[in-house]
Image (cartoon, rainbow, N blue to C red):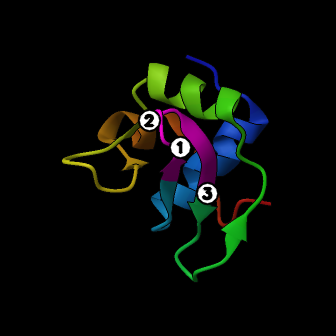
Amino acid sequence: MDISRAEQRILHLLAQGGRIELIRDDTRKIAEIKLITREGWLFGGLDLETFRKLKRKRAIGSRQGQPYLVTRRGLELVRSQLDNR
């Protein structure tokens, strides 16, 4: 299964130890998505559409309300690179 360059970059950051945190509004809908790298930096290249694509492909997952992390399937999809440039 092919994944886009943006999805590839996000999976790479997650595979290196990043996480996706969701902020919900009063009606429990997603209001904001934050991708935080392992160094604690905020990555601005993640939007709701890309998040839903990765979730649909089962490349990311969350357990018991914790932040979203890369799954084993996501690690299979990401191509190994020295860095994500």
Q: Which residue carries the number 1 mark?
A: 25
Say whether residue 80 is visible.
no
Asked whether the residues under the numbered discs 3 and 2 touch, taking CB atoms below 8 Å apart as contact, a structural biologist would say: no
Quarter of the image that includes the N terminus = top right
SS type, badge 3: strand
Q: Which residue carries the number 2 mark?
A: 28
Q: Is residue 28 magenta?
A: yes
- Magenta residues span 22-34
- Tell me which label, 3 or 1, sits earlier in the chain: 1
The answer for how far apart the CA atoms under marks 3 and 1 are is: 14 Å
For discs 3 and 1, the disc positioned in front in the rendered view = 1
Q: Residue at x 66, y 41 (%)?
A: 8
SS type, badge 2: loop
Asked whether the residues under the numbered discs 1 and 2 touch, taking CB atoms below 8 Å apart as contact, a structural biologist would say: yes
Tell me the amino acid under the disc marked 2: Arg
Main structural element of the magenta stretch: helix, strand or loop? strand
